[in-house]
Image: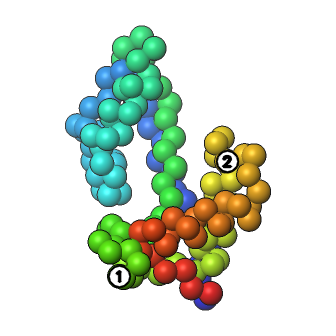
């Protein structure tokens, strides 16, 4: 039986407009398999309106990878890169429904979108 998707949170104080992939940010994100350089670029862009080096309380929510794959299939309709269950699709949809850009969509529509995305990257959806 498929297990529920459990997210984890990382809490840290990050200096506005001056985040760097050096300690402490780099190791905190790196040990969780996240790219610190990408986070720092996005964070610095987002906080450029604040005074530089103002400590910003930051919470990163990490969602696990139910398919447990590094990348999608090279030939999506011919190769299967991984499998996810319908329960995983439902759990992902519930998480996505809380995002600002998805609040107006019903759960069924979000599930259909996720299933379509799975097909386009070579992830098989199983019952």
Answer yes or no: is residue 118 visible.
yes
Residue found 36% across the figure and 69% down from its top: 72
Residue 112 sits above or below residue 31 on the image: below
Extreme-left residue of the structure: 22
Task: Mark 2 or mark 1: name the one nearer the start of the chain.
Answer: 1
Q: Residues within 10 Å of mark 1 (few under 14, many from 20)?
A: some
Image quadrant in which the C terminus is located: bottom right
Q: Position of residue 41 (x, y in %)?
A: 32, 32
Residue found 67% across the figure and 47% down from its top: 102
Residue 105 sits above or below residue 114 on the image: above
Could you say which disc has been placed on residue 79 in the image? Answer: 1
| CB contact under 8 Å: marks 2 and 1 | no
* Nearer the camera: disc 2 or disc 1: 1
Q: Position of residue 70 (x, y in %)?
A: 32, 68
- What is the basis of the colouring in this image? rainbow
Image quadrant in which the N terminus is located: bottom right
Answer yes or no: is residue 68 visible.
no
Using the image as rendered, state which of residue 50 and residue 124 is in the foreground. 124
| Label 2 sits on residue | 102
Kind of element beneath mark 1: loop
Using the image as rendered, state which of residue 102 and residue 6 is in the foreground. 102
Using the image as rendered, state which of residue 25 and residue 35 is in the foreground. 35
Q: Would residue 109 appear left or right of 64 to someone viewing this image?
A: right
Residue found 55% across the figure and 67% down from its top: 116
């Amino acid at each position: 039986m498929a297990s529920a998707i459990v997210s984890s949170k990382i809490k840290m104080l990050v200096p506005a407009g001056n985040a760097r992939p050096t300690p402490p940010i780099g190791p905190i994100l790196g040990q969780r398999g996240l790219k610190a350089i990408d986070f720092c670029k996005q964070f610095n862009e987002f906080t450029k309106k604040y005074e530089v080096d103002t400590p910003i309380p930051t919470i990163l929510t990490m969602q696990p990878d139910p398919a447990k794959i590094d990348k999608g299939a090279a030939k999506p309709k011919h190769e299967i890169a991984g499998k996810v269950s319908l329960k995983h699709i439902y759990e992902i949809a519930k998480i996505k429904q809380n995002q600002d850009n998805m609040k107006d969509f019903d759960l069924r529509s979000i599930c259909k979108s996720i299933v379509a995305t799975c097909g386009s990257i070579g992830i098989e959806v199983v019952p």
